[in-house]
Image (cartoon, helix red, strand yellow):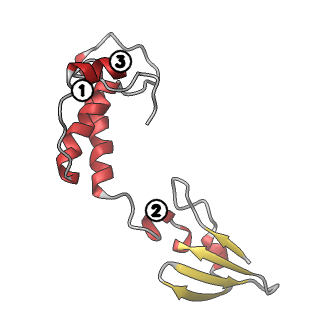
Amino acid sequence: MAIVGNIGHSDNEIQVAQLKNHKWTNTKDQVDMIEMPSGSRIILLSEGRLLNLGNATGHPSFVMSASFTNQVLAQIELFSKKGEYAPGVYILPKHLDEKVARLHLARIGVKLTELKPDQADYIGVTIDGPFKPEHYRY
C-alpha cells in the first residue's frame, strides 16, 4: 500500500482522472483508498489536491497576515528606494522583518518592552534594533 499526497503548487501533479476507473472507498473525510486491478491499494489524500488546503485548514490567517505584511513592506521598500536595488533576489531587511513582528505581537498577547542600554550592549545591538544580525535567518 502507498500513501499518496500532493504538497506541490498545483492540483495537476497526480493523475487522478486515470485513477477514477478503479474502485474507490472513502475511508474518512479527504482520505480515499483506491484498489488497483492487481489488488494493490493506494491511499489518496485530498483527492490529489494540495494537502495543506485539503487535509488541514490551510495557512492560519495570522500566518497569512504576517506573510502579506512582509510582502507589502518589501514592495514599499523597493518603491521608495528606486535605484538602490539592482535586479535580483533579496532577503527582507531585519528592521522590516522586526516591524512585521511588532505589528502582530498584540494579536498573540505579547507586550514588547524596550531594551535598557546595558541589555543592548550585552547582546551587541542598538536599543531600537534590529535585534538580530542581517545574516541570521528565522
Q: Residue at x 28, y 53 (%)?
A: 62
Task: Give the SS element for disc 3.
Answer: loop
Quarter location, residue 121: top left
Q: Is residue 63 visible?
A: yes
Task: Give the SS element for disc 2.
Answer: helix
Mark 3 = which residue? 124
Residue 90 picture location, percent across and down? 43, 24
Q: Residue at x 27, y 48 (%)?
A: 65
Give the label, 3 or 1, closer to the camera: 3
Q: Is residue 23 left or right of residue 84?
A: right
Quarter location, residue 61: bottom left
Mark linked to residue 52: 2
What's under tag 2, amino acid-wise? Asn
Between discs 3 and 1, the one toward the N terminus: 1
Mark 1 = which residue? 76
The answer for how far apart the CA atoms under marks 3 and 1 are is 29 Å
Q: Is residue 68 left or right of residue 89?
A: left
Residue 31 picture location, percent across and down? 54, 79
The image quadrant where one finds the C terminus is top left
Between discs 1 and 2, the one toward the N terminus: 2
Extreme-top residue of the structure? 83
Q: Is residue 31 left or right of residue 4?
A: left
The answer for how far apart the CA atoms under marks 1 and 2 are is 30 Å
* Nearer-the-camera pick, 59 or 24: 59
Q: Mark 1, residues whose alpha carbon is within 10 Å: few (<14), some, or many (≥20)?
A: few
Mark linked to residue 20: none
Task: Give the SS element for disc 1.
Answer: helix
Q: Residue at x 56, y 73 (%)?
A: 45
What's under tag 3, amino acid-wise? Gly
